[in-house]
Amino acid sequence: MDTVLLLGEAGPGGAYVLRLAVAQPLAISFGRFAGGELIPIPAGAILYTGSALGQAGGAALARRLLRHATRSGAQPPHPIRTDIERAFAAAGAAEAALRPPRQKRLHWHVDYLLDQPQVSLTHIIALRSQQRLEAAVSQLLQADPLTGVLRPGLGASDLPGHTNLLLATADVAWWANLAHRLAGLLPPNSFA
């Protein structure tokens, strides 16, 4: 499986799934979520669903993914950041001057998880589309018997009733088929 897979129409925005590997159990606060309570995160695979919709000619999706692959302060970025730059450049889907952020401020729930040294961003599946697909992607993943909710609402402040940070207990075949399942959410004729 490619580390960065871009599906759908060439365009500036879309929805995406991040695959994170948590090396050891930890407990973290996700900003103000649940009153700042420490939430236990088990070792294993975590999925995050997000979106970035931008104006035509922009690179909202590429910028968002580069931001996710960047850690705050002087911490090194996730190694996948170089793969993100290459994938978008090869697809002609990013501005030539696209650069990762210099300073990252923790904002989204997933930022708090991605900032931990025990967590690695390992894979990305991006659905390039100007249609809002985040809720459909989130629903597809939540309904899967091989995913589990870490805490209701986590990672989905802007999607009431959804949870965008999920534990995944899937095998290799499930991961290999995930891109095909997600591509089924794209509108017809959306492949460039």
Image (tube, rainbow, N blue to C red):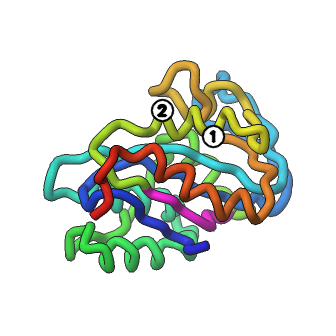
Q: CA distance from mark 1 to mark 2?
A: 10 Å
- At numbered mark 1, what does the secondary structure look like: helix, strand or loop? helix
Residue 113 pos. (x, y %): 64, 50
| Residue at (45% x, 38% y) in the render | 134
From the viewer's perspective, is residue 32 above or below residue 4?
A: above
Residue 77 magenta-highlighted: no
Q: Quadrant of residue 11?
A: bottom left
The one nearer the camera, 109 or 15, is: 15
Q: Amino acid at mark 2?
A: Ala
Question: Which circle marks residue 135 in the picture?
Answer: 2
Q: Amino acid at mark 1?
A: Leu
The one nearer the camera, 112 or 140, is: 140
| Residue at (81% x, 50% y) in the render | 169
- At numbered mark 2, what does the secondary structure look like: helix, strand or loop? helix
Residue 19 pos. (x, y %): 63, 57
| Residue at (34% x, 71% y) in the render | 88
Residue 10 pos. (x, y %): 26, 61
Residue 121 magenta-highlighted: yes
Residue 67 pos. (x, y %): 43, 59
Regarding residue 181, the answer to whether it shows in the image is yes
Q: Which residue is mark 1?
A: 141
What residue range appears in magenta? Answer: 120-126
Regarding residue 63, the answer to whether it shows in the image is no
From the viewer's perspective, is residue 43 above or below residue 136?
A: below
Question: Which circle marks residue 156 in the picture?
Answer: none
